[in-house]
Image (cartoon, rainbow, N blue to C red):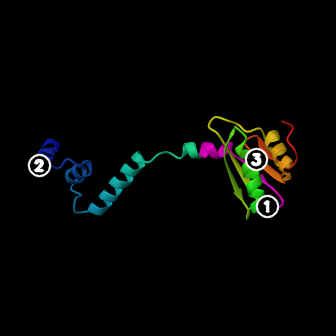
Amino acid sequence: MLRAMVARGLSCCVCLTQRSFGMLNWFPKTAVVASVVVLAALLSPTSAPAAEAKKSNVVVTVGEMCGGCVKKITKRFDSVGEVAKVECSIEKKSVTLIPKPDVRLSPKTMWEIMAEIGKTPKKMVTPEGTFTDKPKR
């Protein structure tokens, strides 16, 4: 029966399934949607690398932040080789440090750099833990 369907030009697996079970008139739109969903799931990239990257970020919360602070923080961390990107939020009063691939940022070093700038962290969230005081390592 399957060969006969393929010979008639019904090469789509959804069409073959529907024809063989007599479901073509029963739910044609549902079958098409299901096919699209399955195809999209197979072709879409996984979000595991993004989730893994977020786990390695360092988020620093400071007391106050303005545009001048953002420039100063960004300029200072641009010279740190392990940091790939710096994202500052004036509204949240936070700095997110995104490391280069396969790099772990030292909580102590990041804390000290922020203190050098005059922005002593109120809180620092790292893969190693959450700190409200200067980390020991």
Instruction: Tell me the SS state at disc 3.
Output: helix
Tell me the distance, in whole angstroms, between the alpha carbons under discs 2 and 3. Answer: 69 Å
Q: Where residue 49 sits: x, y (%)? A: 56, 42
Query: Hey, what amino acid is under mark 2?
Result: Arg
- Report the span colored magenta: 51-66
Tell me the distance, in whole angstroms, between the alpha carbons under discs 1 and 3. Answer: 15 Å
Q: Is residue 75 left or right of residue 48?
A: right
Query: Hey, what amino acid is under mark 1?
Result: Met
* Label 1 vs 3, first from the N-terminus: 1
Q: Nearer the viewer, residue 93 or 118?
A: 118
Q: Is residue 96 left or right of residue 40?
A: right
Residue at point 67%, 35% (across, down): 103
Q: Is residue 59 magenta?
A: yes
| Residue behind mark 3 | 76
Residue at point 62%, 43% (across, down): 53
Query: Hey, what amino acid is under mark 3?
Result: Arg
Instruction: Tell me the SS state at disc 2.
Output: loop
| Residue behind mark 2 | 8
| Residue behind mark 1 | 65
Q: Where residue 108 sits: x, y (%)? A: 82, 40
Q: Where residue 76 sits: x, y (%)? A: 76, 47
Q: Nearer the viewer, residue 14 or 92?
A: 92
- Asked whether the residues under the numbered discs 1 and 3 touch, taking CB atoms below 8 Å apart as contact, a structural biologist would say no
Image quadrant in which you'd find residue 52: top right
